[in-house]
Amino acid sequence: MNVGLAAIGADFHGSAGDLQWVINAYLLPLGALLLLGGAAGDRFGRRYLLVWGTALFAAASIGCVLAPSLPWLLSARFVQGVGSAILMPNSLAILGASFEGEAKGRAVGIWASVGAAMAAIGPVLGGWLIDTVGWRSIFLINLPLALGAIVFGLLFVREVLPEREAPPLDVTGGVLATVGLGTLTWGLTIGSGPAGWTLMADGLLAAGVILMLSFLWIEKSRGSRAMIPLNMFGSPPFVGLTLLTLLLYGALGALMVLVPYLLIRAAGYSGTQAGSALLPFAVILAIASPRIGALAGRIGSRWLLICGPLVVAAGFLLLLRVDQQSNYWTALFPAIVVMAAGMACAVSPLTTAVLSSVDGSHTGSASGLNSAVARIAGMIATALLGNILAMTGPELVQGFHIASLACAAACAGAGVSIFLLFTAEAKKA
């Protein structure tokens, strides 16, 4: 999707704010409804929700292909996000319920490795399709994949309904979280754009804060039945890990949007070339993550989670060497390798650390919340890129450098949050 932003903007004559929403219309429901999707699977059946979530994603992909205007595309992207929020948590929950012990670890490892491999292939294939067929074709490719997933799900996944009835879904919390995050994102998108912090941007930001405070109040009143049990935040390690996720994945989200956009708009790369530029990142992550995960099992997660973000910060500083005339192999490639090495130190240990930071009754909620925070971080980062996406030529390069510095600072902050708050790896109440 990130590789296609420039082509979509040119086709629909979209502004920088429009391009931000092409990404965030998907991330908003995904981040806000991820926990609700997992809870729905526990209540109605995980295979049922996996199949219907995939079908909804496929139907929304058809809507993206046929979209006659940008509002229609954004609406279809929103529905895609809803479908992903239903299918993603239930796919992992099905694996967790289907295997035990060491086999479960291997199954989850394969699940994560396939995801990383597809993340490497996706931008390259997407860029080639944009160059040869057009940007709408990147949504068509979802259809055979979705059909295959539905067929395999129906044939091979055994439905296991919960032994006891699950609590009612926190629909009110889900709606408030979606509207609140959407309002915040809208305000940030306007404020970070060429118009600046207008009265409308300030009003939307204030309204978003009020809605999110209302969401927290409702979650507190629901206690253990809440979509997000707030007593998890009584664990300082969990707070530190949540801050790390927000800062580190926010920086990563900005990287994934800005690098292809800069290469296409300022350096004259084709879609295929821009999609291939980040290929080493996903390859290194896929190869190194299982080994780092094993290392974390021996020495613990804390120092890996401190050092990893600092290495990513160093990679962002290396991006200051990138400009319109830079050679890929001498300027961009070293930065990507350094950032990938740092992310590999954090990704696998993060999952283990999140599960160890709360008591056993909250491990599912903690894992789901951490995944949601990662998506919301990318959404916030994208919302803050308005001015940069409106730039061209040397001005775009300068904005890219400013964003790189900000991302480096965020990654350093992620490491500091772990150093200060994640002081033990024992389970916390």
Image (cartoon, grey):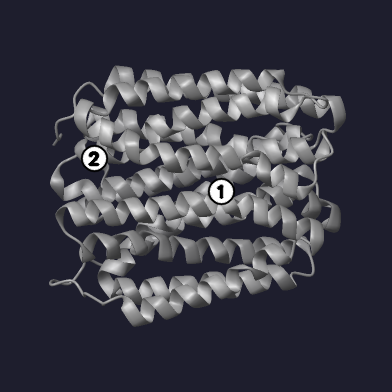
Residue 346 pos. (x, y %): 38, 32
Mark pair 2, 1: CA separation:
34 Å
Q: Earlier in the sequence, mark 2 or mark 1?
A: 1
Which quadrant, please, contains the C terminus?
A: top left
Give the left or right position of residue 260, taking residue 60 as reference: right
Residue type of the residue flagged with mark 2: Met
Secondary structure at numbered mark 1: helix
Q: Report whether residue 203 is seen.
A: no
| Residue at horizontal 56 percent and vertical 44 percent from the top | 379
- Where does label 1 land, which residue? 120
- Where does label 2 land, which residue? 232
Give the left or right position of residue 363, taking residue 248 as reference: left
How many C-alpha atoms fall within 10 Å of the one at disc 2: few (<14), some, or many (≥20)? many
Front-most of residues 392 and 31: 392
Against 108, residue 188 (above or below) is above
Secondary structure at numbered mark 2: helix
Residue 334 pos. (x, y %): 61, 24
Against 408, residue 343 (above or below) is below
Front-most of residues 221 and 258: 258
Residue 168 pos. (x, y %): 26, 67
Q: Tell me the number on the disc at residue 383.
A: none
Against 331, residue 257 (above or below) is below
Give the left or right position of residue 319, taking residue 271 as reference: left
Against 357, residue 166 (above or below) is below
Front-most of residues 205 and 275: 275
